[in-house]
Image (cartoon, rainbow, N blue to C red):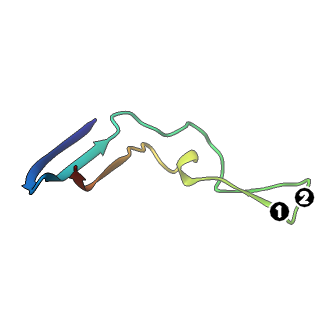
Amino acid sequence: LALETGIRFPAGNNNIDLRVYFDHSLTNVQKTGDAHVVEYQSSNPSQFKYHSVVNTGLVDKVSLFGGGMKIGINF
């Protein structure tokens, strides 16, 4: 879902745009998995394999969102 709105102000021969936007994911972006955060490797004990917390069973749902403001000049 993406929403964006803005206002255009005339500035001489050019225009200045001020925009606000918001993005939100409607689906779960988590990949299913049951990995541990840190995994011991028996083949190379001095090296550990690290996984994201998102890919473990510690998180139920992940939804992304973002927002911000855009400023632009139209010639």
Residue 57 is at least partly visible in this image: no
Q: Amino acid at mark 1?
A: Gln
Q: Residues within 10 Å of mark 1 (few under 14, many from 20)?
A: few
- Disc 1 target residue: 47
- Disc 2 target residue: 44
Which secondary structure, mark 2? loop
Q: Amino acid at mark 2?
A: Asn
Which secondary structure, mark 1? loop
Indicate the position of residue 67 as horizontal and vertical percent values: 28, 52
Marks 1/2 in contact by CB < 8 Å: the verdict is: yes
Query: Which picture quadrant has residue 50?
Result: bottom right
| Residue 36 shown left or right of residue 25 in the figure | right
Residue at the image position 23 percent from the left and 48 percent from the top? 21
Query: Disc 1 and disc 2: Cα gap in Å?
Result: 6 Å
| Residue 49 shown left or right of residue 70 in the figure | right
| Residue 38 shown left or right of residue 42 in the figure | left
Residue at the image position 42 percent from the left and 36 percent from the top? 28
**Image quarter (top left, top right, bottom left or bottom right) of the N terminus:** top left
Indicate the position of residue 66 as horizontal and vertical percent values: 32, 51
Q: How many marks?
A: 2
Residue 47 or residue 72, whichever sits in front = 72
Indicate the position of residue 13 as horizontal and vertical percent values: 12, 52
